[in-house]
Amino acid sequence: MKVQISSERCQGHGRCYDLAPGLFGEDDEGYGTVLGDAIVPPGQESAARLAVANCPERAVELLEET
Amino acid sequence: MAVDDRFARDYRQDRDDQPEGTRNEIITGPVSDWATDFSHLEPEWSADPYPIQDDLRQRCPIAHTDRFGGGWLPTRYEDVASIAYDPERFSSRAIIMSNFRPPHEIAPVGGSPPISSDPPFHHDARKLLLPAFTKAAVGRQEPGTRALCHSLVDAFGERDVVDAAAEYAQHIPMRVIADMLGFPPEDGPQFRIFVENTLEGVNLPPEERIARMTQLFDYLVAQVHDHLDHPREDLTTYLINAELHGRKLEPSHVVGTLVLLLIAGIDTTWSAIGASLWHLAKTPADRERLVAEPGLLPTATEEFLRAYAPVTMARLVRQDMHWRGADMKADDWILLSFPAANRDPAQFDRAGEVVIDRQANRHAAFGLGIHRCVGSHLARMELRTALEVWLERIPEFTLEDPSAVTWSAGQIRGPRALPLRIR
């Protein structure tokens, strides 16, 4: 499972890095960034889903690997 | 280095040759039908706008009024979001729905950039402010905010009843923004007057409104001069020195942005803190649960922001168009109600209820799109800290007299008198 942020849609609300600080960070202007290789480690899946479900701009996406 | 003489003469004196904007007849008094005659300045709306919005959402999702020279009120989340995402058709040239439309020539900068700005200017003006308002940057204000909250509770002394709006909520954002701007903390009472004049005085006669706004600008120009004489590490000095497109900012841009930061930073957060305490005072089950489970507070805070979103914005229609069933004319207002969007059952389960452990909460309290509230991280920090300290110090409290609670009028809604029994 991977996370990604659409930089087109992100407006820097910061819900992702509030709710899943292990997966997301903020840049110098407050826009969300994906930390590391974007792969969701075991135990962080629910934090990832919470970040998706709370982004007001629908900028955070979860890519389920098949 | 050349002396900075941008502020040597009052920049407002150079505006005599500019177009003046347009004024319309001021219409006040009881609303006949909210679908065709709405007014967010009438007492019925201030007291409880939610039943009005719910009714409109069902029978007429986009209401109209002839007041304020003509305007529209969308009540569905989908319509509010579409307008927020469409600055090409809905301009931010003015964002307070009033009886005055500033001249077209003021765009794309507007009177208080970047909230009043349209693309492409908006992006660069906003970029100047973003670094000062990141979560990391505002985190540095948290220890001071916490200490302030404690000192406000200390000041209650042995009294049984206190006004949580006037004695607690209002002081927190006032002091924090005064510190960030480098304004004297003892000027707080003046800020309150400026805020009320700007946001609640919209139906006053024009001469009075102009006179009151002049007081605000005079105060800010004096602060700019003080910072020119005594530069220091704060946002005012930062704005004075900031450059945009290779030049220092126009004096009107510096002062206009100070207007925004001062006004928008205060009564919005004051309202959010007050509305949250009001809810907890009248809902013992939620209050007891948060006292028992402080870890739930961040989630509950988001729900208070959804259910009691304090901020409604405005836009101006750019040109005549037929939009989702509404015959919009150029320069019609749009009253962009994020509170109404946040209670749309098509977007939220149990939209009309306050569910303090709501997990999925894609609310629009801080707006959507390019104008997302630049102070949202600051507001969240202040709101969370204010509630944490209050619940820690005063775990039991009730409404002393529900009928004594008063709410502000206009586009920012929150309690202005909130007597609570605290022991």
Image (cartoon, coloured by chain):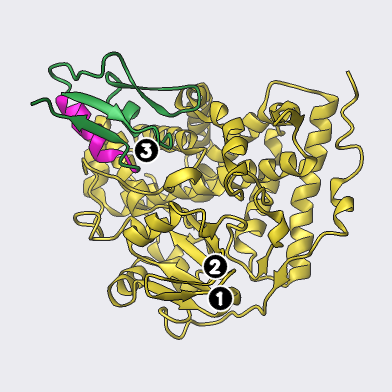
Chain colours: A green, B yellow
Q: Residue at x 48, y 30 (%)?
A: B150
What is the spatial separation of the Cα atoms under label 2 and label 1, in whole angstroms?
6 Å
Q: Which residue is mark 2?
A: B333
Looking at the picture, tell me which residue is in the foreground, B235 or B172.
Answer: B235
| Mark sitting on residue B70 | 1
- Chain of residue at mark 2: B
Disc 2 or 3, which lies upstream in sequence? 2
Residue A36 location (% of width, % of height): 30, 13
Query: Do tags 2 and 3 sit on the same chain?
Result: yes
Mark in the foreground, 1 or 3: 1
Residue drawn 69% across the image and 51% down it: B111
- Say which residue label 3 marks: B394
Q: Main secondary structure of the magenta part?
A: helix
What is the span of residues highlighted in magenta in the rendered image? Answer: A45-56
Q: Residue B402 location in percent, x, y?
A: 38, 62
Q: Which chain's residue wears label 3? A: B
Q: Amino acid at mark 1?
A: Gly
Are the residues flagged by discs 2 and 1 in contact, CB closer than 8 Å? yes
Sooner in the amino-acid sequence: mark 1 or mark 3: 1
Instruction: Please tell me in which quadrant of the rendered image residue B243 appears.
Output: top right
**Horizontally, is A46 left or right of B146 in the view?**
left
Q: Secondary structure at mark 2?
A: strand
* A48 in the magenta segment: yes
Label 3 secondary element = loop
- Classify mark 3: residues with Cα within 10 Å, few (<14), some (14-19) or many (20+): some
